[in-house]
């Protein structure tokens, strides 16, 4: 006779099914209305006027929160497997960007998990093919340049670039834009 599954095992299985369903069937479906309806039910939070383009992958959407007027371009990956990812309002994430919350401790003899939540505050801009590592907070209005790897917290309105990313400049503090980006078919 088999042992009944625990609630945690059922949650993990259901989460895997939800992730698989979106990542392999819906994320390339050319209807943002259908994708958005699924994401509204699947993500922890999906704000208003959010644009999530085709090809975006969520490793666990239940721990991902996307604020109002934010834009997530094609090919991005959100790793919410163990820790949450929180995006503020009017965040712009360029194509193929990756946000990681979990990895392994390279010094661990047992390959232990290592990670932490990622917080991206209002009006941040994450450029093409950049990567944010676990436990990082991008302060309000900060920018991460194309192809950069962010390993540490930023200061408000700082511009960061490189591998690892370092501060290379500053943005104006009086930003006033508001996104509403929903192109047809993507």
Image: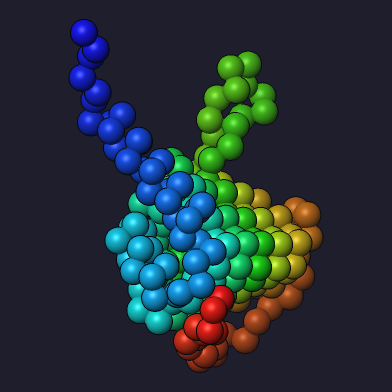
Which quarter shows the N terminus?
top left
Residue situated in front as seen by the camera: 156 or 64 = 64
Residue at 61% x, 29% y: name it.
Answer: 105
For image coordinates 24% across by 23% down, the residue present is 5
Residue 12 placed where, x, y %?
35, 36
The tally of labels here is 0
Q: Where is residue 77 in the image (x, y as percent from the top left)?
A: 57, 55
> Is residue 31 depicted above or below 84 in this figure?
below
How is this picture coloured?
A: rainbow
Quadrant location of the C terminus in the rendered image = bottom right
Image quarter for residue 6? top left
Q: Toward which corner of the image does residue 15 lie, by quadrant?
A: top left
Residue at horizontal 35 percent and vertical 35 percent from the top: 13
Residue 162 location (% of width, % of height): 78, 60
**Closer to the camera in the image, 63 or 57:** 57
- Residue 17 lies, with reference to residue 54, above or below; the image says above
Q: Residue furthest top?
A: 1
Viewer-closest of 12 and 94 = 12
**Residue 158 percent across, percent down from the top left:** 65, 72
Relative to 18, is 127 on the left or the right?
A: right
Q: In this view, does 14 lie to the left or right of 150?
A: left
Whether residue 178 is visible, yes or no, is yes
Is residue 156 visible in the rendered image? The answer is no
Residue sitting at x 57%, y 62%: 55
């Amino acid at each position: 006779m088999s042992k009944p599954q625990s609630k945690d095992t059922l949650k993990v299985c259901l989460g895997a099914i939800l992730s698989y369903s979106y990542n392999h069937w819906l994320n390339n479906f050319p209807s943002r209305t259908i994708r958005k309806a699924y994401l509204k039910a699947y993500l922890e939070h999906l704000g208003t006027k959010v644009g999530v383009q085709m090809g975006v992958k969520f490793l666990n959407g239940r721990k991902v929160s996307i604020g109002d007027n934010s834009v997530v371009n094609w090919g991005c990956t959100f790793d919410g497997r163990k820790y949450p990812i929180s995006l503020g309002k009017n965040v712009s994430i360029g194509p193929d960007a990756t946000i990681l919350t979990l990895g392994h401790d390279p010094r661990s003899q047992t390959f232990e998990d290592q990670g932490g939540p990622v917080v991206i505050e209002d009006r941040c801009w994450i450029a093409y093919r950049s990567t944010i590592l676990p436990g990082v907070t991008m302060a309000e209005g900060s920018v991460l340049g194309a192809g950069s790897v962010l390993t540490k917290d930023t200061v408000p309105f700082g511009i960061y670039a490189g591998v690892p990313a370092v501060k290379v400049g500053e943005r104006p503090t009086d930003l006033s834009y508001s996104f509403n980006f929903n192109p047809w078919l993507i």
